[in-house]
Image: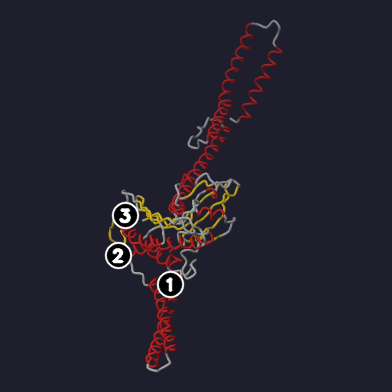
């Protein structure tokens, strides 16, 4: 029976009770009293039935509202045997099934996206509405080279990392190619996604170092080979001709000045040939023959080799080693050449500072640190922020007579050793070249 029918019956019973009481004789017999009591008893029984049919279903529906409030989508309501209430119970149960399925789907989707972000080869940095870093994936942690707790909860400009600083300069919905002082090149994109009606900014960081270095290497190898071929062929012919003419004129009197000019020209041709050969040597870097070596021993050999040059320039060379440094796989010959180039650059930087009129005593610090790190620091002229991003570019040099191949050689050798490295001047004024296996 429907709720409306129960209500009509209840209203009819109450009306009949009222009419009965109104027309009950004042001096009614005991029979009339018994009839009235029986009628009232029936009304009470109906009232109990009415409670079970009306109030109890409403209480059940109220419990369902509490389940919704608590977001307990696993519970269900049982039918109460009342048509209207059971219709509400059925609708409620279907709604709970749909909400549960939707929650499961969203959880699966979020878990899938979370796993995808964590496994992505691209760095992902997500900001909150106040531009604080709220989340970053493992690849982003590796690219920033900082523990996650030193990045999350901070503005990017507060993070002490060159890549974070470059990210903070990118405007919304823009893409920028960033070249850092560790020879790494990144393609950084700032975009946003909408969550709960609000845009959340995020960064995608793609490491392009290997691809660009391969393309860069292929380009300059082709140029160097072509120039080397043309210059060497030309200078060989010129020097041969000049040598023949010099020999012919040397027997003639009064030709000493001309012969001297010829010899200068020949020496200049040889000098140009050696100049081109140094470029060609970068192209011909052999693949490293990796052998397990003690890193401290390799570094101390280079330090002893460079002590003489430092003493000649009045530079103090400090050395410190960490006994906990592990053995590493390296090509000793190539790696020693790298360290020698780094130390020579440090010496030249200090000399250039002295030439600029700064009489501060020159000092170089070489140290190793566990597990497998080497650092060379100097108090030379330093590197400007504008120069940092160009340091490892082919043919770029800040020296007046530099060829721009020294750091390219270092980059190539360290990359083939799978080392991470960086070169920059820090706030304390020291320029540090850090190498980590």
Does 409 appear above or below 158? below
Residue at x 42% of width, y 67% of height: 406
Depth check, front residue: 1 or 120: 120
Instruction: Determine whether, in the image, residue 336 is placed left or right of residue 150.
Output: left
Mark 3 vs mark 1: in front: 3
Q: Position of residue 428 (x, y in %)?
A: 49, 51
Q: CA distance from mark 3 to mark 2?
A: 19 Å
Q: Which residue is mark 3?
A: 296
> Split into 4 quadrants, where in the image is the C terminus?
bottom left
Depth check, front residue: 283 or 213: 283
Q: CA distance from mark 3 to mark 1?
A: 35 Å
Q: Which residue is mark 1?
A: 218
Identify the secondary structure beneath mark 1: helix
Residue at x 66% of width, y 16% of height: 17
Q: Which residue is mark 2?
A: 289
Depth check, front residue: 241 or 171: 241
Q: Residues within 10 Å of mark 2 (few under 14, many from 20)?
A: few
Instruction: Determine whether, in the image, residue 266 is placed left or right of residue 53.
Output: left
Q: Position of residue 299 (x, y in %)?
A: 33, 57
Q: Disc 3, disc 1: CB below 8 Å?
A: no
Identify the secondary structure beneath mark 3: helix
């Amino acid at each position: 029976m429907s709720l409306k029918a129960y209500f009509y019956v209840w209203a009819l019973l109450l009306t009949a009770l009222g009419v009965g009481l109104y027309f009950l004789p004042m001096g009614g017999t005991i029979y009339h009293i018994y009839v009235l009591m029986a009628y009232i008893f029936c009304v009470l029984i109906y009232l109990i039935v009415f409670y079970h049919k009306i109030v109890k279903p409403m209480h059940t529906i109220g419990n369902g509202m509490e389940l919704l409030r608590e977001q307990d989508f696993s519970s269900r309501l049982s039918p109460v045997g009342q048509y209207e209430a059971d219709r509400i119970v059925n609708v409620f149960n279907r709604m709970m099934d749909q909400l549960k399925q939707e929650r499961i789907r969203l959880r699966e989707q979020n878990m899938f996206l979370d796993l995808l972000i964590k496994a992505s080869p691209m760095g992902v940095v997500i900001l909150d509405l106040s531009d604080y870093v709220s989340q970053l994936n493992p690849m982003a942690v590796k690219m920033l080279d900082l523990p996650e707790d030193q990045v999350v909860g901070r503005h990017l400009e507060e993070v002490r990392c060159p890549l974070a600083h470059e990210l903070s300069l990118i405007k919304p919905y823009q893409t920028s190619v960033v070249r850092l002082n560790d020879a790494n090149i990144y393609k950084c994109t700032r975009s946003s996604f909408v969550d709960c009606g609000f845009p959340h900014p995020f960064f995608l960081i793609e490491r392009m170092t290997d691809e660009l270095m391969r393309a860069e290497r292929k380009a300059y190898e082709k140029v160097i080979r072509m120039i080397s071929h043309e210059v060497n062929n030309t200078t060989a012919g010129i020097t041969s001709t000049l040598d023949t003419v010099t020999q012919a004129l040397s027997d003639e009197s009064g030709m000493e000045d001309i012969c001297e000019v010829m010899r200068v020209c020949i020496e200049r041709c040889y000098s140009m040939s050696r100049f081109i050969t140094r470029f060609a040597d970068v192209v011909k870097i052999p693949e490293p023959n990796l052998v397990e070596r003690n890193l401290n021993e390799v570094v101390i050999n280079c330090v002893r080799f460079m002590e003489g040059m430092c003493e000649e320039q009045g530079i103090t060379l400090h050395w410190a080693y960490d006994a906990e440094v592990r053995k590493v796989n390296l090509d000793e010959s190539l790696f020693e050449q790298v360290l020698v180039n780094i130390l020579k650059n440090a010496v030249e930087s200090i000399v250039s500072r002295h030439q600029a009129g700064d009489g501060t005593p020159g000092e170089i610090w070489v140290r190793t640190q566990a597990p497998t790190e080497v650092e060379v620091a100097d108090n030379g002229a330093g590197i400007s922020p504008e120069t940092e991003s160009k340091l490892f570019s082919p043919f770029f040099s800040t020296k007046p007579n530099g060829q721009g191949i020294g750091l390219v050689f270092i980059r190539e050798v360290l990359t083939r050793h799978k080392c991470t490295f960086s070169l920059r001047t820090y706030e304390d004024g020291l320029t540090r070249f850090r190498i980590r296996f």
